[in-house]
Image: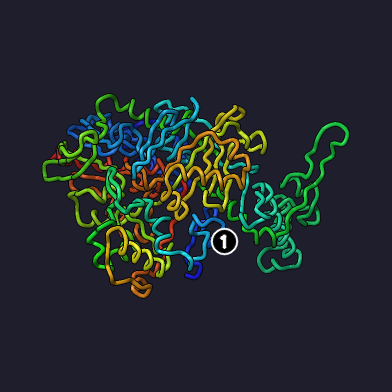
Amino acid sequence: MANDTGTASITRRDLLRMIGLAGGGAMMYQAMTSLGIAAASPYRPPTSLQGTGHGTVLVLGAGLAGMTAAYELGKAGYKVRVLEYNDRPGGRTWTLRPGDAFTELGGQRQVCRFDPGMYFNPGPWRIPYHHHGVLDYCRRFGVALEPFIQVNQNAYIYGKDAFGGKPQRMREVQADFHGGIADLLAKVAGQGGLDQLVSREDREILLESLRQFGGLDAQYRYVKGPDSSGHRGYAKDPGGGPDAAPAFSQPVGLSDVLNARLWTGLGMAEFYDYQPAMLQPVGGMDAIAKAFAREIGEGVIHYGAKVTAIAQDDRGVTVSYEDTASPGAVRREKADWCVCTIPLSVLSQIPIQVSAAKQAAIAAVPYMSSSKVGIQFKRRFWEEDDAIYGGVTMTDLPIGMMAYPSHGIGTKKGVMLASYAFFLEAYEFTAMNPDERIRKTIEYGAKVHPQFPDAFESGMAIAWHRVPFAMGCFGWWTDAAREKHYADLCSMDGRIVLAGEHASYLPAWQEGAVLSSLAAIDMVHRRAIEGARS
Amino acid sequence: MKTVIVALSMGIATAVHAQSMDPRFIDQKHAAEITGEQTFTHVCQGCHMADAKGAVGAGHYPALASNPKLAAKAYPVVMVMNGRGGMPPFSMLLTDAQVADVVNYIRTHFGNHYADTVTAADVEPFRSTTPNRPRGHRP
């Protein structure tokens, strides 16, 4: 991505606005594209702060939002200090590796027993191609990325009441779903049912497109044969030598497809957030956290600091905190400005001197529950036995979805995300102890992959409401809550501004943390400049 | 609210049909069979812990055990239905009767001895007319 800076008199943003005014949307689009910014992204490399700041900023939290603020403000000349509850950078950007210990709320301690080189991301684990902020920092900081396989048509869809509880290949479900719809629509068109809606010419084009979309035969039927098998796969794959002719597979009829409800497991890849290509950092998501911490430099982040109160007056901000190693003794840190990235699940419990409206906003966003279980298996049976190389299997079991590692394909062992549950199922997983979560994951996972019990080696089970530094997975906004509270949450209040995924329209995504932070530090910087002038 | 306990099926919201496949998961059971104690052990104890004594991290989960705030029965009902701060709302997951049952369970266990009981009719007024359903985010 181009990193071109605006001149002193005109920023790139101004330039784009002028082009937009003068030439309309299409010209603006062209201009943006030529300036190296994808049209959809609100992200712009933060260059306007450089070398102009002075004064002190206290950042609360060393997750991606906090570290974005610390990095950019530090670069701009502010004296920055970060208070972080954990003894590592990253917050929810977190990777578990052999030897790592984790004690959850309630006191249950897990030690990661994976083999060397194996890892598990309990938090964020994939990056959409349009998360330009995160991707730009990866590029600038030299974080190596590799493909994350989200869509694998050979992965399974499992419905406990569908097809006798036998997992179905996503490829077959999708082909039969699309084929059935295309067949139906072609029939309706053939019987004149669309004559009032489309011209005769368009109808012919529609029929031709339905053949391609649904794998219909020359008579526009979705039936057993080369066209449908070309989509759903074969009963016997085409081979070589004598006896190599393929055997066609038998499609499932539309009524059965609809009633089995397996189509509920399709469509993930249709969503903008999960469309290929997705990416992941090589070696674990915490590569991004480590890169930020390295770029911020030594001595800026104070680890093991539990914030207990946030106060402000005309002259500055005072934050009280305890060292987690020696609780009880209150310490204080002062600064001109404060960027607070503490999750609202925690911040709503900390006395903070902001307006009543902001306090109401802080208390108004509950945190979604989510639970993940990562299991190291002694062999990659999903590859060896099932020909599944990365991707996601969807189930309606309490374990939710499963994901196969995109990296290490063809090697001996692997760590699978064996359960990823949300909402009610996640509450239930949270209510168990970690050993029990792993036991239930193996029990339910065996319904899709009978190899689970024999191939199991060790696991780590993270339920986000029991994670001491987050107390929930992410800010659970509703449209009504946004309407009422979002503006108050994001506004600058005296000398304090909030940032984090909760202060974005990208709930849970790292991109939300980065973009909210850039917006927050822009507000701080403007106030600081105003203050210096007045 | 007939099926009562609604869960996300494969990421896209649909009703889950009750089947007693595993009593450890309450969504697999008929709503009418679920007791206040089961709701506590399957949901509440995730944060408030099995002994209802809560937990402390960067923030804290309050103890329900011997908690004088439970004296006014409307307080736990409002908290369970609507949530606040670290407490998520459960109105979209639990029926009025289930909320009453779990509140009654908590108010008569863990060192709490409140004799007045909550009924489903007491809970109903706190049910918001606009369902607070989550969107299907799963980053």
Residue A273 versus residue A367: which sits nearer the camera?
A367
Q: State which quarter of the image contains the C terminus of chain A.
A: top left
**Percent position (x, y) of residue A398?**
52, 52
Q: What's the residue at 42%, 28% (across, down)?
A: A99
Q: Residue tagged by mark 1?
A: B19
Q: Residue A366, percent across and down?
A: 34, 54
Residue drawn at x 27%, y 48% is B60
Q: Which residue is the extreme one toward the bottom? A: B121
- Does A137 appear above or below A14? above
Q: Residue A368: give x, y in percent of width and height.
A: 40, 52
Please tell me in which quadrant of the rendered image residue A482 appears: bottom left
Task: Tell me what residue is drawn at x 20 percent, y 42 percent.
Answer: A527
Instruction: Give the residue type at disc 1.
Output: Gln
Location of residue A135 with respect to A370 vertically, above or below: above
Nearer-the-camera pick, A534 or B51: B51
Is A139 located above or below residue A320 in the figure? above
Residue B82 x/y as whole percent: 34, 62
User: As rendered, which of A311 and B78 lies closer to the eye?
Assistant: B78
Colouring style: rainbow
What residue is rendered at 51% in x and 57% in y? Answer: B23
Give me the chain letter of mark 1: B
Asked whether the viewer can see residue B90, the reply is yes
Is residue A30 visible to us here? no
**Residue A1 lies in what quarter of the image?**
top left
Among the 4 quarters of the image, the one containing residue B80: bottom left
